[in-house]
Image: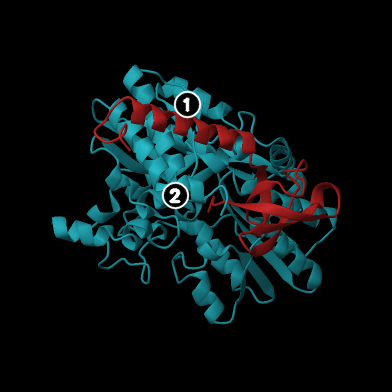
Chain colours: A red, B cyan
Amino acid sequence: MCLAVPGRVTAIEGEGEFRTARVDFSGVTREACLAFVPEAQIGDYVLVHVGFAITRVDEEAARQTFEALRAIGELEATTGGDDGASR
Amino acid sequence: MRHVDEYRDPQAIQVMLGQIESTITRPWTLMEVCGGQTHSILKFGLDELLPSQIRLIHGPGCPVCVTPLEQIDRALAIATTPGVIFCSFGDMLRVPGSHGDLLLAKARGADVRIVYSPLDAVAIARREPSRRVVFFAVGFETTAPANAMAAYAAARDGLDNFSVLVAHVLVPPAVDALLSAPECEIQGLLAPGHVCVVTGWRDYEALAERHRLPIVVTGFEPLDLLRGVHAAIVQLERGDARVENQYERAAVAEGNPAARRILEEVFTVCDRKWRGMGEIPASGYALAPAYAAFDAERVFGLGHMQVEEPKECLSGLVLQGRLRPTDCPHFGKRCTPEHPLGATMVSSEGACAAYFHYGRRAAAEAAA
């Protein structure tokens, strides 16, 4: 029920609390109300739940998550293990 | 799909599993609160990938499942009233009431409609001024702002043929009740990411302190869940007990200010009955006095209705994490998604349905 799906804002219509976006979910387009994400702009990824965007995806935070993972992955590869360093 | 696929990447998942394995030194029991998380864990087999010292118990975070029988019966009473258009999210339609479900009512001629957004129900009320349109407002804090917007839009448009049957529940009071139980085995908590997107996590800080356990705000993809588990295990191994965010791309400490504003405008906190858990103080939303004219229980005079929960369904224990679905004597026998005894077997997020759909039934039989 609390499922929220990320999609990309491709168009915005209207103003104020009932501002509406067209959101592309990998080829499927749906409308989403932007009442709770007034800062959303075309090109942003938003999480959509029951027809409402509930947050804008923070691209910088997402990038940092994977940077941290890559740092761990490389660290493990260079500090040994049975196959890491030779690959 | 961007912001989904990379969180299912097998290599990244291996890295995270390695981190968990190298951190853990003894058994720990964690609860994931949200039914969406439970489904991801079973769908992607994370419960089988994680070290055997980690026990995951499944929380009450399925609003469809915790909605008490009497609220389903109220929905049925309203839906079968002549002239009513009853609008609901799809997953409520097959939840059994005392006598049948909403889908059966629809088959017998009731005008029950599935809506994608609560605003769709308001649009129907606008289009059909001669009909009484009722929206079944079910959900946790994630869904509450959207449902609040339906009442807000109806009030703004002066619609007098629209009302809302409210069954809103709140996560922190239910978690508090679970953690306060003397037999509680939960040592760490994966907090529901999308609830926290709306509310932030101030309430969870109080819980972490009071019950001295780590609480990790966690997303829904496999990598999100493993990061949540890892952060909880790191804290447990160190003896820490604080709130930590592992859903950084979506949730911030203060939540969503615009969503919280509409919640304050439209709703007021009330006591709510939870299926299997009984009444929990201050654990739900009701319409605020200014929106009383949109309260379907008032409009249809159903406030007094009280119904006993059926004895044979053990979903109350499942919802509290005290019974694994496969340990229920009815699981996969008298109770299946086609013929459910209770909501946990119906909802796309119910723990029983998750075990049934993702093959844990066969595993349970093989082990028996």
**Mark 2–mark 1 distance (CA, rounded to whole Å):** 20 Å
Residue A83 is drawn in which quadrant?
top left
The C terminus of chain B: image quadrant: bottom left
Q: Which residue is mark 1?
A: B207
Residue at 71%, 35% in the rendered image: B257
Where residue A86 appears, as percent x and y from the top left, is: 30, 34
Q: Position of residue B180 (x, y in %)?
A: 38, 29
Query: Where's residue B273, x and y in %?
Result: 49, 47
Q: Report whether residue B300 is seen.
A: no
Chain of residue at mark 2: B
- Mark 2 lies on a secondary structure that is helix
Task: Name which of mark 2 and mark 1 comes first in the sequence.
Answer: 2
**Mark 2 on the same chain as mark 1:** yes
Q: Foreground residue, A12 or A59?
A: A59
B27 relative to B154 in the view: left or right: left
Q: What's the residue at 33%, 42% (across, down)?
A: B57
Above or below, B27 relative to B161: above
Give above or below for B268 relative to B292.
above
Foreground residue among B27 and B34: B27
* Residue lying at the far top of the rendered structure: B239
- Which residue is disc 2 drawn over? B35
Q: Is residue A71 left or right of residue B269?
A: left
**Residue found at x 79% / y 74%:** B130
**Which residue type does callout 2 highlight?**
Gly
Q: Is residue B335 above or below residue B194?
A: below
Residue appearing at x 40%, y 33% in the figure: A73
Crowding at dot 2, Cα within 10 Å, few <14 / some 14-19 / many 20+, comes out as many
Q: Quadrant of the N terminus of chain B?
A: bottom right
Chain letter of mark 1 equals B
**Can you tell which quarter of the image residue A27 is in?**
bottom right
Label 1 is placed on what type of residue? Leu
